[in-house]
Amino acid sequence: MRKDILTKEQKILLFLTAKSIAKAPSLLTLNQGDLDGVDWQTVAIASNKQAVPLATFDAVTPYLSAVPQDVYAKWQKIAMAVLHSGFFVMQSQADLIEILNSRDFPYIILKGAAANGYYPNKGIRAFGDVDFLIDPEKQAEIENLLIEKGYEKSHGDHPNHVVFTKPRAHLEMHFEVAGVPYGKQGERVREFLKNAVFTPQKKTCDGGEFNAPSDVNHALILLLHMQHHMLGEGLGLRHLCDWATFVNATAEQDFWQAQLIPFLKEIGLFTYTAVMTKTCAIYLKTACPNWANAVDEEICQEVILDVLACGNFGQNDAQRSKGGMLVSEHGKDGTKHGRLYYLFKILHDETLSSKMVKFCVLLYPIAYIGKIFWHLGRAISGKSKPIQVFTEAEKRKKVYDKLKVFESEK
């Protein structure tokens, strides 16, 4: 039997999140003992770092007598800011769809509004930017059209997407979904999703009608995205909510047994899927289908602790976020590298994102050396703990090894 080691604040955070998406929210209640001694500021800050401030703010109303007024006011300010930002995201999506439809380009919206469609309350999911998948053969045409419409292309080196921006708009145009593995599993995933943009389902949101992935494709896209972030900078509660609400809404549909579960076993994602589903059932009180019931609750606890420690995109713990690269010893092409390689890779990425290099790429060598001395100085002064990065990476790796990601189960 698992030992309960969550803090009061973590329990409240999970309760409030669950209250917004649970299968039977009316059955979830808090008593006075649950509320005594809670640091509500910690809860509010954590909900923002986990990208669930709208869900938690919506659910905290019955317990306002326990929440300090100043904390509630800041919480409300954060929630309003997220709503305001989401309005512009939906405007960007509507603009994008109008552009794509003008030339009949096939596409599907990834995550974001597509995930939001499975939430019982469509107003509680926070939005970041607009991710969409296109037909790779149309990439050049779509890029030219977006530039024609006033978008600026970001010349990064990301392997599966290109960023386009203009004021108050951030688009990620994917020609392949994130998280596709290397080798035979990657080939099978590409084969499974090859017609995704040509077989969408229509959904609606505040920005109007749009093309979303079919349910079975959406499931695989979410899972690939989740494991990609979990093995990287970190998985947040919003990712879990996206998965939990999807399972809640579709658990009885035929595609699970007919298509998805056999495929997940083939590529080695079934164990991961079952663990994440059981974790959501325990901590977010959502559906737990029979195929996930046998998962050991201890691994679920390890997963939720990792989620709470990392936060959305590693916001909750920078050390764990940086250590994400050290968790996996394989590069994007499947080449196995040592930990020292990834230590220097972290320095490389930090250098590329520095203001000095963005101003002039020729300053890269100076900036790189500067980063080394900056980290050494922080380590000597005790402001950072590089050994802790490796230690945390080892802890995370032990958990992730149990998930058997992309280890074939057939």
Image (spheres, rainbow, N blue to C red):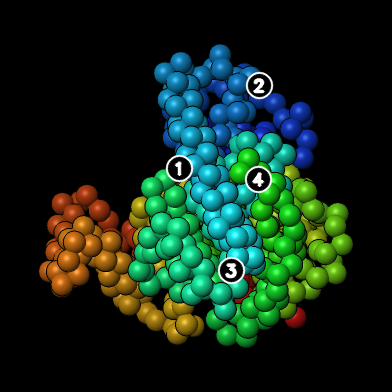
Return the residue at label 4. 208
Toward which corner of the image does residue 326 lie, by quadrant? Answer: bottom left
C-alpha gap between disc 4 and disc 2: 41 Å
The span from disc 2 to disc 3 (Cα, nearest Å) is: 49 Å
Q: Are marks 2 and 3 in contact (CB under 8 Å)?
A: no
**Callout 4 environment at 10 Å: few (<14), some (14 to 19), or many (20+)?**
few
- Residue 385 against residue 349 in the figure, above or below: above
On the image, numbered disc 2 is attached to which residue?
31
Q: Nearer the viewer, mark 1 or mark 2?
A: 1
Screen quadrant of the C terminus: bottom right
Q: Taking the image as drawn, is residue 260 in sight?
A: yes
Secondary element at image label 4: strand
Crowd band around label 3 with a 10 angstrom C-alpha radius: few (<14), some (14–19), many (20+): many
Position of 39 with respect to 281 (left or right) is left
Q: Type of residue at label 1?
A: Lys
- Closer mark to the observer between disc 2 and disc 3: 3
Identified at 49% across, 75% down, the residue is 140
Q: Which of marks 4 and 2 is nearer the N terminus?
A: 2
Locate residue 31, reporting x and y percent. Answer: 66, 21
Pointer 1 residue: 49
Residue at mark 1 to residue at mark 2: CA–CA distance: 26 Å
